[in-house]
Amino acid sequence: MVKPTVLTAATLTQIDPAVAVPGYDRSAVTNGIVHFGVGAFHRSHEAMFINELLAGGGNTEWGICGVGVLPSDEKMKRVFADQDNLYTLVTKDPDGAAEARVIGSITEYLFAPDDPEAVLEKLAAASTRIVSLTVTEGGYSVSDATGEFDASGADIAADLAEGAVPRTVFGLLAEALRRRRERGIAPFTVMSCDNIQGNGHIAKKALTSFATLKDAELGEWIGRSVSFPNSMVDRITPATTDASRAEVAETYGITDAWPVISESFVQWVLEDDFSLGRPPLESVGVQVVDDVAPYELMKLRLLNASHQAMSYLGVLAGFEYVHELCTDDRFTTFLLGYMTEEATPTLRPVPGITIADYRRQLISRFSSLAIADTLARQVVDASERIPKFLLPVIREQLAAGGDIRRATLVIAAWSIWLEGRTEAGDEITIIDRRSAQLQEAVAAEDTTPGALLEVADVFGELGDNTSLRQGYLDARASIRKLGAIGAMEAIG
């Protein structure tokens, strides 16, 4: 076997011609975009779109500077330094057909804990016109129950202290915008790419609330002057594993410390609301629209909520991979029942899309053996995901007198999943910022039935609904008696 080529700018000419590499001059690219949260999804999605734009010629003012703010981002800093900010993206069809390319649109990476001033000056520079975010559903500190900004976190509180050097995303953004205002530089656009309904509105709420607590006048100016476009983003992208690295080395002859493997399907629907201009993203397949809401509701309540709907029941039943579960007729019947009978009635018409076709396409995407996505990835920080994806469906269906049996069974399965054991007795790893609070609640279920529903940070007033509460108790009893699969089948 030929020794794989270590990925750097100097070795691009040595890579197999079957792998597309940047044909544009990366040294001529300036970074009009600063991105917080350079994880696998960003690199399979926004960075890929920008790479395609640069490859088409021109538009050299729209390169990306990545920024990491968490201690765990130090690894990305080291990898990008070694690889000249390059990485391999492999996309796969459900039938396994794959395509690889090297992405070059990220031309700079800053690690904020090392040098927050460098990040602040990058953000304050006139060349920075868009700041994009993939900081996870829980990264905005906006309560699902109240809709208000939560400033109680230790890092937020530290950033609000007088004279503090900012270390959070919103601390850095607020200080950079303060500098721009002071210097007479127009504010950049803040573009959220996270899976949250009205993600632009949530980003605005978080940033203006933080800034107002720091400086009321600054907060008012940001709310009046900064654009926060909404967006819907979609591409199933599992976390990189050692198996991913080995596959890229063996199949494509590239030694890449942090490649990305994703499905071939990709979608980005973006509201056209940018204060300092934007890249011509429609030329590379992005849907630029006036109203994102119908698209985001469809995606969040069908795709993202279905991830929740399958995961807790699937883990309890002993499944590990999404494709295994979604080639089992018992699960696909349940998922299609949830999508058709419970989620779809809460949607609006989506221009250019037939919802029934979209539902069937989702099952095909979920069934892809080529991606080997894990259920474990989908249940991280469930207490942030369930309120954003599944509970809105329950609320609207309750108001309309609609069916909530499947969504309620999912909440019940989550409560049993939180006990930490599968039906076979295997240990479940629970990663959730509220894990202690949640596990305390489920431990009280025997003496206080419905205790989980009383976690106000998750359920808010919904936990008091008598129909939901009774359905939840019945669903828990059904899982206990019949098992996860039996409880699904009992719904029909």
Image (cartoon, rainbow, N blue to C red):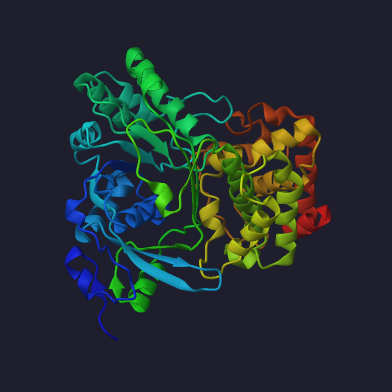
Q: Is residue 46 left or right of residue 466?
A: left
Q: Residue furthest top?
A: 217
Q: Is residue 233 left or right of residue 403?
A: left
Residue drawn at (31%, 48%) of the image? 73
Relative depth, front residue between 23 and 85: 23
Residue drawn at (26%, 28%) of the image? 176
Relative depth, front residue between 179 and 398: 179
Residue drawn at (67%, 26%) of the image? 461
Q: Is residue 150 left or right of residue 356?
A: left
Asked if residue 132 can be seen in this view, the reply is yes
Q: Quadrant of the C terminus?
A: bottom right
Give x and y (percent) for residue 438. Answer: 58, 39
Q: Is residue 155 left or right of residue 319?
A: left
Give x and y (percent) for residue 236. Answer: 51, 57
Q: Is residue 224 above or below residue 262?
A: above
Relative depth, front residue between 83 and 447: 83
Relative depth, front residue between 95 and 441: 95
Give x and y (percent) for residue 152. Answer: 43, 25
